[in-house]
Image: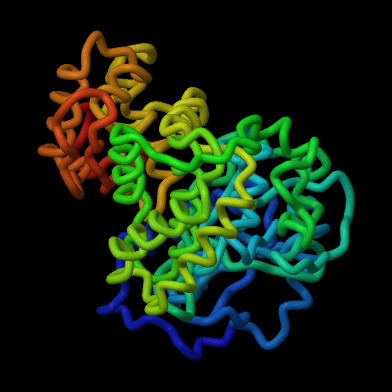
Amino acid sequence: MVENRNPLKKRNRDDTTTTEARRLAKLYVSLGWSLLPIRFRSKQPAEPSWKPRQTTRAAITEVETWIESGHGLGVILGDVSDCWVCRDFDDADAYHRWAAQYPDAAATMATAQTGRGFHVFVLADHAVKTIKWDDGELRSTGAYVLVAPSLHPDGGRYSWIIEPADHPPVRLADVGLDCEWLPSVDDTETTESTHDMFVVSGISVVSVTNEQHEFVMNAIAETVPAGVGHRNDGVFRFARKLLGVLGGQPSDTIAKQYAMLWYDHAKHTIGTLDPEVTVADMLHALRSVRKPDDGQSLVESAMHAARNMQRPWWVVDYDDNLPCTNLARLIVGLSRLSDGNVFYLSCRDAAKHAGFSNHKQSSRVLNHWASSGIIEIVQRGKQGPPGSKATRYRLIVDPYSPPANEGAI
């Protein structure tokens, strides 16, 4: 019997979240996952014993009663869930190191953001044991994880960056998730294996041009976290961008100067008061990067992931190969790869990847969708030549569940 210690009162229930929970629950059941009710704002099961769930899956009707009672959802991994397992990255840097080496997999695999890091879901060929490392663990038979839209005990909700079933499942043995991704003590950027991935790692940058400095300042603005809990992710993303702009490892003097500039922009949101902590983490991140960010990788990854997506509801009546249809898919892809559904997109990048003849056309379409309530302009970019700061957007609708009486925009 499910305990009902902390049910949501009906008058306080978010109907939108409840609808989303039902949709996701049906998806989870269709994947063969064994679900578990989770107490409100807790990681603990809402049942006296969850052992029966390790061998018998709950029906969707039973799961819906948990949702109505205000419970969160967990998935029991391993045998009972058709050998789905979860790579739990407690260290965000470790996740980014893995994603840099397996970029195609990272752009398509079921991935959720947690308070400290990431959950990546993958199929095992057979039953495997739960394995623990310093950067997290591979959770399998006998373990469970919380899934969206469950509430985290510290606030916020679990959310998907890439939902399950958006792409065919990937096999564990193919993507390097069955090992640790923290660097060893003697791991350096001058080893032969690393040199293959980062060919400029041996270049020492001791000066910065004015043009490079402008790009770095844009990179700072793009990677400042929106709130507490995302500092490590912001530090690592900035480190990748800094290496991409400079074309090599900056001297300690340059690295510390930019680390302090990043901290000055981020200190009001990251919750870490000591700047030396951020400086130390930035220097570590710069040494750990395997693949620099050239400024286009996120858009390119999103476009690659979006090609096989179904058309979002506001372009569903349009031809599949129109620029506006490509742009709608790109927006969905970017929102899923970005922190809090907030992403940067320049009109020039939008035109280039969606297929518009010029950036003015893509600008008009983006502004139209903003005025129609599909996307929100969080911060307007700086107009100017290529390389100017892009506009920051947020996708504010469910791309596959249109509001009542809505069709193509």
Q: Is residue 65 visible?
A: no
| Residue 399 location (% of width, % of height) | 34, 39
The quadrant of the picture occupied by the N terminus is bottom right
Instruction: Determine the residue located farthest toward the top in the rendered image.
Output: 357
332 or 20: nearer the eye? 332
Q: Is residue 192 left or right of residue 334?
A: right
User: Residue 279: x percent and y percent?
Assistant: 47, 65
Where is residue 232 drawn, in percent x and y? Answer: 50, 62
The residue at 42%/40% (across/down) is: 207
Residue 328: percent from the left, percent from the top?
32, 29
- Horizontally, is 104 left or right of 372 in the view? right
Residue pictured at 63% horizontal, 51% vertical: 288
Any part of residue 230 in sight: yes
Q: Is residue 335 left or right of residue 307?
A: left
- Residue at far front of view: 206
Looking at the image, what colour scheme do you see? rainbow
Residue at figure coordinates x 17%, y 17% from the top left: 361
Considering only vertical position in the picture, is 304 above or below 22? above
Q: Nearer the viewer, residue 57 or 241?
A: 241
Q: Is residue 142 left or right of residue 227?
A: right
Kindly give the residue lying farthest to the left in the view shown: 371
Quadrant the C terminus occupies: top left
Tell me the residue at 62%/47% (across/down).
30
